[in-house]
Image (spheres, grey):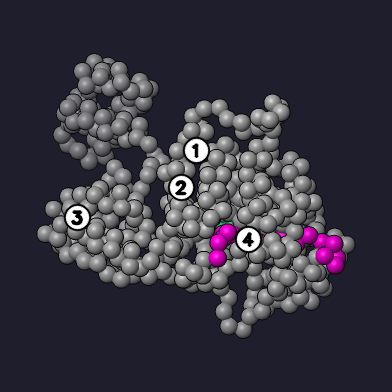
Amino acid sequence: MKNTLLRQLPKMDNLISNSEIQEMIDEQPRKIVMRMINEVLEEIRSKVLNNEISELTSEEDIVKLIKIKVEKYLNYSLKRVINATGVIIHTNLGRSVLNEESNKHISRINSGYSNLEYDLFDGKRGLRYSHIESIINDLTGSEAALVVNNNAAAVMLALNTVAKNKEVIVSRGELVEIGGSFRVPEVMEISGGTLIEVGTTNKTHLKDFVNHINENTGAILKVHTSNYKILGFTQEVAIEDLVALGEKKNIPVVMDLGSGTLLDLTKYGLSKEPTVLEQVQKGIDIITFSGDKLLGGPQAGIIVGKKKYIDLIKKNQLTRALRVDKMTISALEATLRYYFDENKAIENIPTLKMIAETYVSVNNRAHLLLKLLDNKYGEIQIIDGESQVGGGTYPLDVIKSSLIEITCSNKTAAQLSAALRKLETPIIVRISEGKILLDVRTLMNEDFEYIAASINELLE
Ligand SMILES: *Cc1c(COP(=O)(O)O)cnc(C)c1O
């Protein structure tokens, strides 16, 4: 029986002469079509052997299966998705979004040659960092600046430069893990510094630092405990005191600021976080922060601080390995330019715009979306809820928002959310108590029609 089935299975040659396969071979990479023919035949063969099928799949169906596989393979793997989670800086969904004007600029730079490392004034070799260094200095008040691949790289590079084969003193309360892959002890190890933990989880005093300083101390490190807060009986050493200590002992103070906001966001209802400018003014020697968190730009690690140390970092061979490409530089320059005017920054940088949008405005937009949705097959309504800044920032802050709540009559919430993920442009939603929630804060108006049409069709 099995053998009969296997013998009847179309041969590769037969399939290749099938007219639809021929068409595919003409239009698509031959190698991929061949591979998918093999894969489909192999899958059927193993099903026959495992007694999973007792009837041969028709050639027509085999061709269909091959077609689906080829199409799936040739589709983009990295694609745009719609973020209905209400988490503004969503690390799994690519963190910050860039606006259209920035994207136009980036596309222009990247679809031609550019003066990336060419000095147009002298007609000689230039420096890639020159395009963004002075704007970063102007916005943060720093003496010098450098940009690398991401903040993890920035911290590692800074420590490697000032504290390789030396000791780095850190408070036990700041040995953080961010997003599962950035862990202070491990970054320290890679940088070649030796971690000296001082104090306790909840309390660290200045004397804990003083007591551990010796001739082999390379740096004092302060880490922003981005994604958690220690509450209750706690004490941390103020950065001002660490800076004074560092100055006295001639030891650089490095601060991993994590998100690093350039604006005071308390006006928009968030708790106080010192801006990068405020931190620089405290005299910290080296400060690092991310480009794609609160700054709202591309993935990058920005290093600012005293020229003396930034110059050392620029000369480190590791900098070459961690350097950023023209895509990053063009995206960062496009983003940073808005910051000269706070209103322009809030209006044009999507991350900031989503944080700053008032509840009333989100609620109005929720009503626009609701109007497009068909209430026939489920119960759809607007409810109040909470958005989050995300990206490991503001762990305790929430922003009041309006959400579309869908109770579906013919599908479970898990089924509907899976179907939404399978769309051409997937929609990523929240599920709560068996209901689908779409937080309108992170949705863009231009996607409303698509979202509504997709949901209406799926609910039918
Ligand atoms: C987010 C974060 C990092 C990692 O930054 P990436 O830009 O993701 O590399 C490191 N330290 C702190 C404190 C952070 O918040």
Of the numbered discs in the image, which one, if any, rests on residue 98? 2
Q: 10 Å neighbourhood of mark 1: few (<14), some, or many (≥20)?
A: many
Name the residue tied to disc 3. 372
Query: What secondary structure is the stretch in magenta mostly built from?
Result: loop
Mark pair 3, 4: CA separation: 43 Å
Q: Is residue 351 visible?
A: no
Whichever of callouts 3 and 4 sits on the residue coming sooner in the sequence is 4
Q: Is residue 250 visible?
A: yes
Please check the rendered image and state whether residue 78 is part of the magenta-colored stretch, yes or no: no
Q: Which residues are magenta?
A: 247-264
Is disc 4's CB within 8 Å of ligand 1?
A: no
Which kind of residue does numbered mark 3 sit on? Leu
Which kind of residue does numbered mark 4 sit on? Val
The answer to which image quadrant residue 44 occupies is: top left
Please count the marks in the image: 4
Mark pair 4, 1: CA separation: 25 Å
